[in-house]
Image: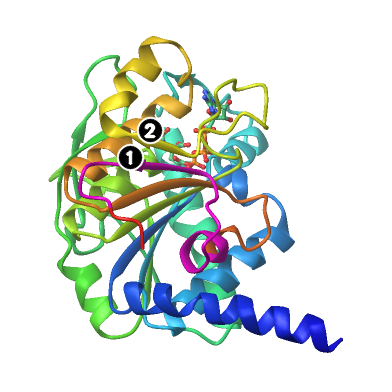
Amino acid sequence: MKDQAIEKARILSQALPYIQKYNNKIVVIKYGGNAMTDEQLKKNVMEDVVLLSEIGVKIVLVHGGGPDINAMLKAVGKESKFIDGLRYTDEETMSYVQMVLAGKTNKNLVSMISDLKSKAVGICGMDGNIIEAKKHETPDLGYVGDIVEIHPQLIFKLLDDGYIPVVASIGTDDNHVYNINADMAASAIAGALNAENMVFVSNVPGVLKDAEDEGSLIPQIHVRDVQHLMEAGIISGGMIPKVQCCVDCVRQGVKKTVIIDGRIPHALLIEMLSDEGIGTMIVGDEYEEL
Ligand SMILES: Nc1ncnc2c1ncn2[C@@H]1O[C@H](COP(=O)(O)OP(=O)(O)O)[C@@H](O)[C@H]1O
Ligand SMILES: CC(=O)N[C@@H](CCC(=O)OP(=O)(O)O)C(=O)O
């Protein structure tokens, strides 16, 4: 019993340099819909978000919700169609995407944070014109948007006032509302906020040497090696835009980007506050180990 308590205290004390490192720093967390399907694991992720926020990390939570959107479309008898990992979004689909992402999924995360006695504000990229977008041109995906510019003032204001901004990936121009891939929204927001760290919470261990073999994790990739890994077919499918987003983040000055497995309880705490490496880190020359 006493030994267990000492071990717990040792692990807690290990967190001190990380708490100091991240105090008052902005960290963007992208929480993917595939890692939200288990309620207990979702609660673990929200507990980690709240704990990090309570120790002074300025957390911005950008979320996806692909499976929630698929379920809604199925319920109304509409087919989900993806091209190169992006959802074909006709006008009717767009209204469901907005309803689900900025409604059910967003408010569920906000209420979980409130239940943990912390303060969150749920918004989407239309609020405060955060995500200025334009129609994605080729291929024609309907109301799928590309990000033109991030206007981060509202996010800064919420962080300054002690709120955790919870952001749904919907953008707008003067005339239309657009469905934005949540990885892209998160990385563009991280770049615009000059975040210290960008963490993608997914449902894979990270980048694998062999996508079929969960034991083949690549712990660290330098941005200069990403092109080669794509050409060699090691990074493929849904991992291509995610890794590309990591590279964009690093190029925009985010010091560390990491893809972690939301199926591991408290993966965020392990990643942020311990000496244990978890997932795949994608870094540039600027990155320094603590
Ligand atoms: N080298 C790789 N390592 C891990 N996953 C890979 C790799 N290549 C392709 N993938 C695929 O990428 C998917 C992760 O992307 P995605 O489903 O878009 O995640 P999320 O829902 O978190 O946004 C995995 O489910 C896997 O099928
Ligand atoms: C254009 C596009 O594909 N948008 C995504 C937005 C949600 C998302 O990205 O959710 P995940 O992170 O859970 O995949 C979609 O409609 O599914």
Q: Residue at x 40, y 38 (%)?
A: 94
Quadrant occupied by the N terminus: bottom right
> In 3D space, how far apart are the residues under numbered discs 2 and 1 (Cα atoms)?
5 Å
Residue 246 - label: 1
Q: Residue furthest right?
A: 1
User: From the viewer's perspective, is residue 245 above or below residue 114?
Assistant: above
Q: Residue at x 52, y 52 (%)?
A: 277
Q: Are marks 2 and 1 in contact (CB under 8 Å)?
A: yes
Could you say whether the residue bearing mark 2 is in a helix, strand or loop? helix
Q: Residues within 10 Å of mark 2 (few under 14, many from 20)?
A: many
Residue 221, image quadrant: top left
141 or 264, nearer to the observer: 264
45 or 172, nearer to the observer: 45
For residue 212, say whether it is visible: yes
Quadrant occupied by the C terminus: bottom left
On the image, the x and y values in percent for residue 182 come to 39, 44
Residue on which the image places disc 2: 243
Range covered by the magenta-colored residues: 269-287
Residue 27, image quadrant: bottom left
